[in-house]
Amino acid sequence: GDAPDPGQVTARLEAGLAAGRPPLVVLRAPARPREDYLALAAATLPVCEAGGAELIVHGPPDAFYETPGARGLHLPWREAGRLTDRPVPDAVWLGVSCHNAEEIRKAEAIGADYITLGPVQPTESHPGAPAMGWETFADLTSQAKVPVFALGGLAFGDIGEARARGGQGIAGIGFWWPQI
C-alpha cells in the first residue's frame, strides 16, 4: 500500500508520545525517497519536542546534518560498516543496527552510544532474516561495552525478557509504529 502522509505519521506519533512511550524516537522509513524522508523528519521534530522526546534520524550521516534539531543518528549496518570514525558530534546520540559480534565491535570502535541487536525473533520488517533467539542475544549482549536494545519480532511485553537477558529494553516497530 501507499505510505502514510506526514500528517498521519505525526498524528500517530503524537498519540504514542501522549501514551508515555520512550523519550527517544528513531524515525526509520527506509522505503521513502530521501527528500520525502527529510520532509517527514522536519514534520516530526516539533511533535517530538512537544511530547518530550528526542528525534533520532535513521540513515546515512548526512540525514542528521540535514535535519536541524535532530538529537542523534541511527546508522543501519550498511552505513556503519563503511565508517572508521564517529560521524556525529559527541553531544548527540549515535546508534548502530547490529546482527553479530563483529558488527558490535565495529559499532563500539566508531563510538556508538547504543546498539540495536537482532532480529531476536522472526519479523515481518526483515523477512527471511534468521532469528538469533534470546540465548544468542544474551551471549552477544554480555560482550558489548554499550547499551543494547533487542529488536525484531518483539512485543511491548518483551521488555522484561530483554532486560533479564542483559539488554536495556526493546526497539519496536510493529507493536507501536506501523510501516511508514
Image (cartoon, rainbow, N blue to C red):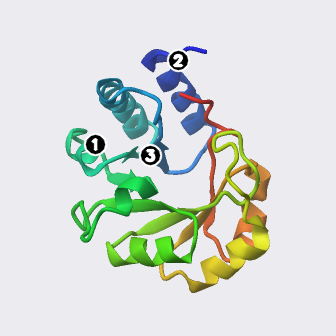
Residue assigned mark 3: 53
Precedes in sequence: disc 1 or disc 3: 3
Residue assigned mark 2: 4
119 vs 59: above or below = below
137 vs 57: above or below = below
The disc at residue 63 is 1
Mark 1 nearby-residue class (10 Å; few <14, some 14–19, many ≥20): many
**In the image, residue 165 lies at what x, y percent?**
73, 75
| Image quarter of residue 40 | top left
The answer, for residue 165, to whether it is visible in the render is no
Asked which secondary structure carries label 1, the reply is: helix
Residue placed furthest toward the front: 128
146 vs 168: above or below = below
60 vs 180: above or below = below
Callout 3 amino acid? Ala
Callout 2 amino acid? Pro
Image point 48% across, 82% down: which residue?
145
| Image quarter of residue 47 | top left
Precedes in sequence: disc 3 or disc 2: 2
Image point 76% across, 48% down: which residue?
155
The disc at residue 25 is none
**In the image, residue 23 lies at what x, y percent?**
49, 51
